[in-house]
Image (tube, grey):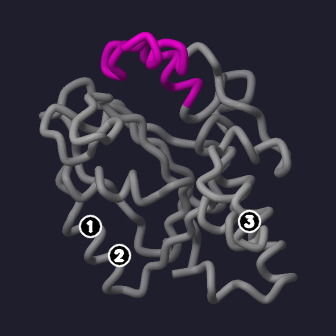
Amino acid sequence: MKYMALDEETETWHSRKRKANPFDTRNWIVARGWKVEGDARCSMQYFPTKESVIPLVIPDDVGILVGHNIKFDLHYEMTNGGYDVLRAFFKRGGKIWDTQYAYYLINGQKQSAQLVAMDDIIEEYGGRKKIDGLKELWKAGVKTSEINIDLLTDYLIGTEEEKRNSGDIGNTELIYLGQLKEAEALGMMHMIER
């Protein structure tokens, strides 16, 4: 079975002490990025409005969904029409690999390895840090749906110069592949793959 790296950029309304709360009806998936094992480049869908969001498609030959803090993305999928898709994936034996959680386990559950951001670990796995411009826009209160689609695309799946094989999706894949080697060497595969 193949893996599929997944990440989403969402609308960013805060409520109930949660940033970009997936249970706030004002929020939706603005951009969804993914890469299936064997793909030459990452793919992306853009949803300018909540009404335009379509459910995630998980190919039948995908057995592992990979993401960094993937529970955030899965909550969004479930609240944006993807409940049946995820249920079918799990019923056929689909598993989840959370690179944030795996990092914590691989590093001996140290406090310093708990809830790490992707930027904190990506260079260990040969990737690049995120584009700062997008983070600055979010800090300034700009909603994801108001951000230029080209900047969002570069952030999520990499630039044209990177052949759209970087960004959050490409970095997620690099971390996953590195963690697979680490987990196998440590005998931790069953603990991490859930």
Does 92 sit above or below residue 76? below
Q: Which residues are magenta?
A: 134-155
Horizontal and vertical percent position of residue 45: 38, 36
Main SS of residues in magenta:
helix
- What's the residue at 43%, 17% (across, down)? 149
Mark 3 vs mark 1: which is more N-terminal? 1
Judging depth in this view, the residue of 160 and 79 nearest the camera is 79
Mark 2 vs mark 3: which is more N-terminal? 2
* Left or right of residue 106, residue 56 in this image: left
- What's the residue at 47%, 42% (across, down)? 33
Verify whether residue 142 appears in magenta: yes
Horizontal and vertical percent position of residue 24: 17, 40
Give the residue type at disc 2: Phe
Horizontal and vertical percent position of residue 160: 66, 22
Q: Quadrant of residue 78?
A: bottom left
Q: Which mark is residue 89?
A: 2
Q: Are marks 1 and 2 in contact (CB under 8 Å)?
A: yes
Give the distance between the C-alpha atoms of the residues marked 1 and 2, in whole angstroms.
Answer: 6 Å
Does 168 sit above or below residue 99? above
Number of labelled discs? 3
Callout 1: helix, strand or loop? helix
- What's the residue at 19%, 27% (across, down)? 49
Q: Which residue is mark 1?
A: 85
Give the distance between the C-alpha atoms of the residues marked 3 and 1, in whole angstroms.
Answer: 35 Å
Image quadrant for the N terminus? bottom right
Give the residue type at disc 1: Val
Q: Which mark is residue 110?
A: 3
* Left or right of residue 129, residue 148 in this image: left
Verify whether residue 105 appears in magenta: no
